[in-house]
């Protein structure tokens, strides 16, 4: 599975592409940061990012795009900029029929480091190790984008071989367990009485 991770931001938008094998081994394909400056208008800043996203999607042809879910911060203008970049990125993916998945920072940290409250240094160190890199990806936005891509591949279960219906063995086991749980709960509940 090829995943492009996007850490959205107006000043620095991190981009990371990884290939994840059925055994969950992740391999770096591409990493970078797209930047814009405060001197540019908001529209031009978004255009710079949109053009770069278009180039990355066309060049790397990912199976899925994973983006960080916008969350409330104290700085409203920062949240608005991140939300706008996220929208631009999602539209670019949708135009190409590329599925988009959103993950919170704590989900990504938990998937990559085992700790949903890990700091940026821990995430960067783990990404470096998982991708077998000789040095950490810089800046942190690039490492975060790679962490998003890895986390999505691992959390989605699609990194395991799928059957003819497109369902992996792990996904099928999960569905079977859920189904059995519902049947068991329904058998334990008395039938509702209607008057």
Image (cartoon, rainbow, N blue to C red):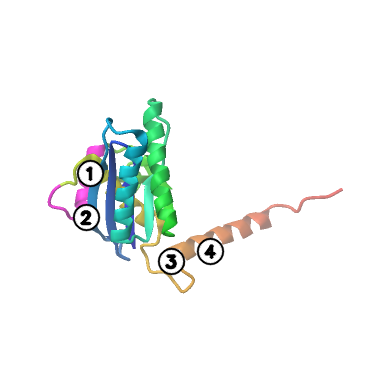
Q: Residues within 10 Å of mark 3 (few under 14, many from 20)?
A: some
Q: Earlier in the sequence, mark 2 or mark 1?
A: 1
Extreme residue toward the top, this view:
74
In the rendered structure, does residue 123 fall within the stretch colored magenta? yes
Name the residue carrying label 1. Answer: 124
Label 1 to label 3: alpha-carbon separation: 29 Å
**Magenta segment, which residues?**
120-135
Query: Is 47 rendered above or below residue 17?
Result: above
Residue pointed to by mark 4: 176
Residue 2 appears in view:
yes
Name the residue carrying label 2: 131
Residue 93 x/y as whole percent? 40, 54
Specify the label residue 168 is tagged with.
3
Looking at the image, tell me whether mark 1 or mark 3 is earlier in sequence order: 1
Residue at image position (16%, 53%) is 133
Q: Dot 1 lies on which element?
A: helix
Within-10-Å neighbours for mark 4: few <14, some 14–19, many 20+: few
Callouts 2 and 1 close, C-beta under 8 Å = no
- Judge whether residue 9 can be spotted in this image: no
Cα distance between the residues tagged 1 and 4? 36 Å
């Amino acid at each position: 599975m090829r995943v492009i991770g996007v850490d959205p931001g107006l000043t620095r938008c991190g981009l990371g592409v990884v290939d994840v094998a059925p055994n969950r081994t992740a391999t770096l394909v591409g990493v970078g940061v797209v930047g814009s400056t405060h001197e540019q208008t908001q529209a031009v800043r978004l255009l710079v990012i949109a053009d770069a996203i278009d180039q990355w999607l066309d060049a790397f042809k990912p199976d899925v795009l994973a983006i960080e879910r916008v969350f409330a911060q104290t700085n409203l203008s920062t949240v608005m900029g991140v939300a706008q970049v996220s929208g631009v990125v999602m539209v670019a993916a949708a135009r190409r029929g590329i599925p988009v998945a959103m993950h919170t920072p704590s989900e990504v940290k938990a998937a990559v480091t085992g700790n949903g409250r890990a700091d940026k240094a821990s995430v960067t160190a783990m990404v470096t190790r998982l991708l077998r890199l000789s040095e950490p990806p810089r800046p942190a936005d690039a490492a975060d984008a790679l962490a998003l891509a890895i986390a999505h591949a691992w959390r989605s279960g699609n990194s395991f071989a799928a059957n003819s219906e497109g369902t992996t063995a792990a996904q099928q086991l999960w569905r079977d367990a859920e189904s059995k749980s519902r049947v068991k709960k329904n058998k334990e509940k008395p039938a509702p009485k209607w008057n």
